[in-house]
Image: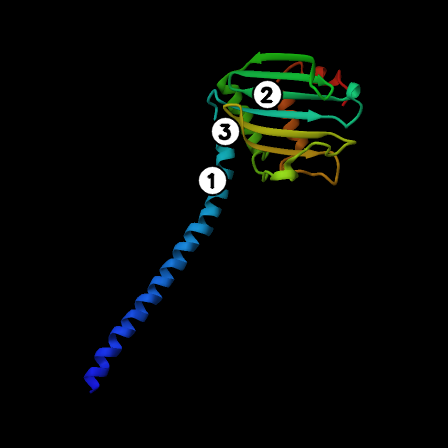
Amino acid sequence: MANYRTSRTLPIILVVVIIIIAVAALVSLARVVFFSGDSNTATTKVDTSRTALLDTTVTHAVRMTVRGPIVADEKFYSYEIDVSSSNRSIKTYNGYLDTVVDQSTLGNSVASYEQFVHALDKANLSKGTELQGDKNDVRGVCATGIVTEFTILDNNEPVKRLWTSTCSGSRGSLSGSVVQITNLFVEQLPDAKKMISNIDL
């Protein structure tokens, strides 16, 4: 009789143990798929932006865009500086449709660009966390002040875009010093300061 009960109990215990192991395995798998995947993605994104910043191949570039207060179309000004391993350029604009006021384009070298992007890296250009959705929309932001955007580009596509403003309520996503990083961009072109001073920001 005892042998009969034992022979019935053992398979039931075995089935219960197998079920517990299967459930534990499914829970572990779910954690790996849904949680560690997200953290890896975030880490990869940060690493990718810094890698893209320091990449000196011809497809990579950095851009700074600065716009003044939101005023009448005739009085609205902005400017943009683009730097890559082959070119440096600045354009100043009037109006919201970006009518070119002045522009200058110069060549560049890999050695010069390498020093520049490493300086940007040490100034923490890529450290900020890019905002998402409406929080990353700078239209109308800091209407009485200046908005500055920095974009890391690969094949003219943004890898990361960070921004800040002179308004205390709209600090944006840039972690580094806007003055330090802006000066690094402006110093890349000999005529940049004069061209910027000719527009009313």
Q: Which residue is the site of mark 2? A: 82
Does residue 153 appear to the left or right of 173 in the view shown?
left
Circle 3 residues within 10 Å: few <14, some 14–19, many ≥20: many
Q: Which residue is drawn at 33% across and 66% down?
A: 19
Q: In which quarter of the image is residue 168?
A: top right
Q: Is residue 32 above or below residue 76?
A: below
Q: Which of 6 and 147 is in front in this view?
A: 6
Residue 59, given in percent of the width and then of the height, sits at 48, 22
**Mark 2–mark 1 distance (CA, rounded to whole Å):** 25 Å
Earlier residue among tags 3 and 1: 1
The numbered disc on residue 54 is 3
Circle 2 crowding by C-alpha within 10 Å: few under 14, some 14–19, many from 20 = many
Q: Dot 1 surroundings within 10 Å: few (below 14), some, or many (20 or more)?
A: few
Whichever of callouts 3 and 2 sits on the residue coming sooner in the sequence is: 3
Res. 152 image quadrant: top right
Which circle marks residue 44 in the picture? 1
Q: Residue shown at 37%/62% (left/top)?
A: 24
The N terminus: image quadrant: bottom left
Quadrant in which the C terminus appears: top right
| Dot placed on the residue nearer the N-terminal end, 2 or 1 | 1
Compared with 13, 125 (above or below) is: above
Q: What element carries label 3?
A: helix
Image spot of residue 198 (x, y percent) = 75, 15
The total of numbered circles placed on residues is 3
Q: Do the residues labelled 2 and 1 touch (CB within 8 Å)?
A: no
**Residue at 47% across, 40% down:** 44
Residue 105: assigned label: none
Disc 3 to disc 1, C-alpha distance: 15 Å
